[in-house]
Image (cartoon, rainbow, N blue to C red):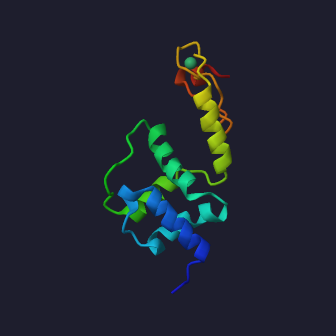
Amino acid sequence: MWELEPGLYAFVVALRMALPEQLSRVSVRKLAGTTKRFWEAGWDPLSVAESCHDVYVQDGKRFPTCRPGQPARWLGWVLKRVDVATTPALRRYDAWAAAADTEPCPHGEPGGARLSVITGRAKCPLCRAAAP
Ligand SMILES: [Zn+2]
């Protein structure tokens, strides 16, 4: 039986509290495997939780508000889509810049033409399609 590092334990507990509807009562040990790489990369638990939401937003879907059938597997599935190299600070900057940019693109979407500093892509699909 491997021991969890105290820092990782606290990280997972905080992440569980950040996603209470999805992860409450799931053992820390079960969640540690899929979240360890974020902890090692210096992410804070709230940013991990926000990134889970973002995955759904990117797909145009609603974030589940009830407990998944297999919470640990669900978290692993969602986090597979999150790039650990994208630091939380960069994500926050990108979100802030996107919210601050209200200039409509040629297609009328506020901030649609702004390029994400993370993906290098515009928010508006029509602007993206028009990009070289
Ligand atoms: Zn556009």
Viewer-proximal residue among 120 and 16: 16
Left or right, 93 with reference to 9: right
Total count of labels: 0
Of the 4 image quadrants, the one containing the C terminus is top right
Instruction: Report ligand 1 position as a quadrant.
Output: top right
Q: Which residue: 53% across, 19% down?
A: 109
Residue 38 at x, y = what percent? Answer: 60, 60
**Residue 130 appears in the rendering:** yes
Q: Quadrant of residue 37?
A: bottom right
Q: Quadrant of residue 17?
A: bottom left
Q: Quadrant of residue 121?
A: top right
Residue 72 at x, y = what percent? Answer: 42, 64
**Residue 86 appears in the rendering:** no
Q: Is residue 131 above or below residue 21?
A: above
Q: Is residue 126 above or below residue 38?
A: above
Viewer-proximal residue among 118 and 98: 98
Q: Which residue: 61% across, 64% down?
A: 39
Q: Which residue: 65% across, 22% down?
A: 131
Q: Which residue: 61% across, 19% down?
A: 130
Residue 51 at x, y = what percent? Answer: 53, 48
Residue 44 at x, y = what percent? Answer: 60, 57
Left or right, 131 with reference to 27: right
